[in-house]
Image (spheres, helix red, strand yellow):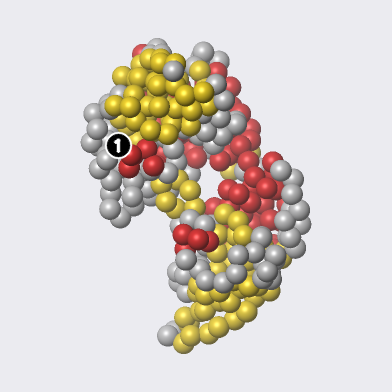
Amino acid sequence: MKRSHVEVLIVGAGPAGLSAAKAIHDSNKSSIRVIERESQAGGIPRHTFHTGYGVRDFHRLMSGPKYAARYVREVESRGIEISTSTTAFDWVDDQTLAITSPKGIEEVKADRIVLATGARERGRHARQIPGTRPAGIYTTGLLQQSVFINHEKIGTRAVIVGAEHVSYSAIMTLRHAGVKIAAMITPLVNHETFGAVNLAATAIYRFPLIRSASITEIFGREQVSGVQVLQNNSNKLKETFIECDVLVFTADWIPDNELVRLRDIEINPQTKSPIVDSRGETKLAGVYAIGNLVLPIKSADQCAVQARTLFS
């Protein structure tokens, strides 16, 4: 088995992890290695093709792929190693992670370990929604990969669950794929994005935002055929069937905290994120948690700026 040592090991090559790598290198020229389980570095922005990235960190508007590519380019130009298709799957001790890649198993010892594994949206199973198990059910991340990377034809008519920033990102992805928006559903009394964004989206794409509502059942055999929606309007319950062949679950974030749990690092019982101090350090000395591993969820450039500030 191969064994190696670096001064800093960063787990996750999204905006937070890459920004941390840049900041650490520029401040003290440490030996740094970044590992990423996906086949390409850059995180979620690399398959988010709309604009809106880069305002806080690069002071310009960029598309997701261009934003991700810039971070990868700037990290690689510093001679920092990025190991893709590489997953940290266990701890050997407090300073050593076991990783696996196409090259095999490796143990990497580091003076500092930075966890930048991010967060994911809860899918249909985690939300415990009854009904059949047809195709056509996505999270935003899976939807974007299916449309922009795999170029799949996904359907014609969609219902979106959630009304956060990322939910409106899903709208743009669906429209790029030629899918009509049948409705957006939120359990809250209002959306959670900017008022101007909601106003523009509903005016341009002409879909209803159904508030104080939830999906109670999913229909369809091989493909989604519709959903049953229960709305609580001024304490009056109303059930509606909405026909659709695509269902997208957005937001409702959970941190990718598997490594945290494997080492029994103390977590926040509400968010399930590791508890960190003002420097981003967890209760385990020398182990840091940054970006969207530490909820509440933040935009990509907020994560990047936070990481830069912590490690500069």
The amino acid beneath tag 1 is: Arg
Position of 212 compared to 244: left or right? left
Locate residue 309: give its quadrant: top left
Residue 166 % position (x, y):
54, 53
Q: Say which quadrant the N terminus sits in.
A: top left
* Residue at (70% x, 48% y) in the render: 147
Marks counted in the figure total 1
Q: Camera-side residue: 118 or 190? A: 118
Q: Camera-side residue: 29 or 102? A: 102
Q: Which residue is mark 1?
A: 263
Asked which secondary structure carries label 1, the reply is: loop
Position of 208 compared to 58: left or right? right
Residue 239 % position (x, y):
55, 83
187 is higher (above) or lower (below) than 176: below
274 is higher (above) or lower (below) than 121: above
Residue 311 % position (x, y):
35, 25
* Residue at (63% x, 51% y) in the render: 143
Locate residue 106: give its quadrant: top left
Query: Would residue 106 be visible to someone looking at this image?
Result: yes
Locate residue 139: give its quadrant: bottom right
Q: Few, some or many C-alpha atoms within 10 Å of disc 1 (few <14, some 14-19, many ≥20)?
A: some
Residue 241 % position (x, y):
62, 79
* Residue at (50% x, 64% y) in the render: 191
* Residue at (45% x, 69% y) in the render: 188
